[in-house]
Amino acid sequence: MRAIPGSLMLRLTRLVVGDQSLHKQLLLWLVLPQLVLWMAAAFVTYNVAARYANRAIDASLLQATRALARQVKPIGNGLFIDFPRAAQDIIEADPDDRVYYMVSTPPGQFILGSKKLPPPALIGPPRLGEPYFYDGLIDDRMPIRVAALYVAYGDSKTRQLMLVQIARGRARRDELARSILGDTVLPLSGLILLMTMIVWAGIRAGLAPLARMRALVEDRAPNDLAPLRIDDSPQELRSLSRALNDLLAAVHESVAAQRRFVNDAAHQLRTPLAGLKSQTELALGENVDPAQQQRLERVHESAVRSAHLVNQLLSLARAEPESALAQHSSRVDLRELAREVTAEWVPKALQAAIDLGLDEAGDDAPPVTVQGHPLLIREALQNLIDNAIRYAGASSEVTVGVRREGSYGIVQVTDTGPGIPPDLHRAVFERFVRATHEGSGCGLGLAIVKSIAERHAGQVTLSGMTPHGLQVRIALPLAR
């Protein structure tokens, strides 16, 4: 087993991490080194276990080698071998962990035992009485552990060397090493798992401020450019929030400058457009030339439409967050407000041959009260009635109604006109989008209504009527 190089681990981490979340990236960067260390620890543990197992086996082999050497005694010019058959049967009894022995006189004269044991690799003359331990193979396939001992016998004139070898299979040694490895690696694996869980919990706790910051950004309205407030976050996140706040401030300043320009331009255009409208009305009353009369009527229509556009732009500017927050917020009774606004628009409805009415709930009906800006809510209702009168067509009916639905107060304006195709129900809330080219509208009425509803944490929806017609509903949270 070899350790993984740092560059390889870096490439492996990049390959595994890919485009994962920051939680997973940090976890992988912390877990992968732990896995590498775990494998290195397992490798070292196995080798240490094998070394200690070798020591135990070598000690038993050395003891057996010395005992066997004592059983071979010189007699005259020969050797007396005191090795009873019972002892031989005991040595060779275990077939799974067989013990091999061999007694020979170098350079290779076999005396006793197995002829297949490999001799020790000597460098220089053999050292008498000192054991040699080495690994080898028997029958060219079975790994064994061998202990060899050189002893001398005979007198000074006839002195000879005798090689005594005892070998044992490595199965028991490997089994012992694996047992030690298992007893070591299993607790280590549990510790790695426990550490991984602790690291995961620490990562989640450390990245919690980032999740809170994400929630702050996700919960914001698209036009909410107020600074992010995360004062209790880590230093790195505070630096990021400061950078974001600087960006939001720059965007806010740019949007505010554009809004001020539109507001100022609309204010500046109101007076000349009102004058142009008055002058064309006077000219229409005094003119007797039919051709010129037609041209004056077109100029008057353009002046009326331009004045309406300017008024709508001013209404839209008042509905923006900065303007809405600057106005006074109070409790508004939607029933009373609907009664007042409907009465104000009756003359214009009569002029357009439209039947405008209020769906009265009765004198004993409880008020439908919301918390908001009275002028803005009035502006939204006026835009709905104005749109209905403009586009419903002559002989149509327009009905204004107010009621409760759960925790919301509902204001709805229903007409029996041609309605709006369902595929345009979402598009008409965008600025300068019109569902029809008829009428003198400018495509800002429903955009203003939507902006005002969102400023009050409400919503506005469209729905078709049967057999034809349109119903616009504004849902605003009831006041507590």
Image: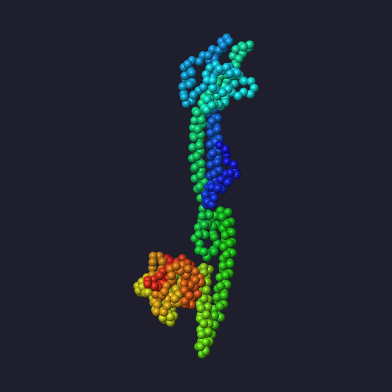
User: In this rendering, is residue 240 above or below 51?
Assistant: below
Spot occupied by residue 117 in the image (x, y as percentages of width and height): 55, 22
Q: Which color scheme did the rendering employ for the protein? A: rainbow
Spot occupied by residue 75 in the image (x, y as percentages of width and height): 56, 10
Furthest toward the top, the residue is 76
Residue at point 56% right, 19% down?
A: 164
User: In this rendering, is residue 116 above or below 332?
Assistant: above
User: In this rendering, is residue 153 above or below 426?
Assistant: above
User: In this rendering, is residue 113 above or below 393?
Assistant: above
Residue at point 39% right, 75% down?
A: 416
Residue at point 47% right, 20% down?
A: 90
Q: Nearer the viewer, residue 100 or 184?
A: 100
**Is residue 159 at least partly visible in the picture?**
yes
Q: Nearer the viewer, residue 41 or 233?
A: 41
Spot occupied by residue 430 in the image (x, y as percentages of width and height): 49, 69
Furthest toward the right, the residue is 124
Q: Which quarter of the picture shows residue 339?
A: bottom left
Q: Nearer the viewer, residue 291 or 245?
A: 291
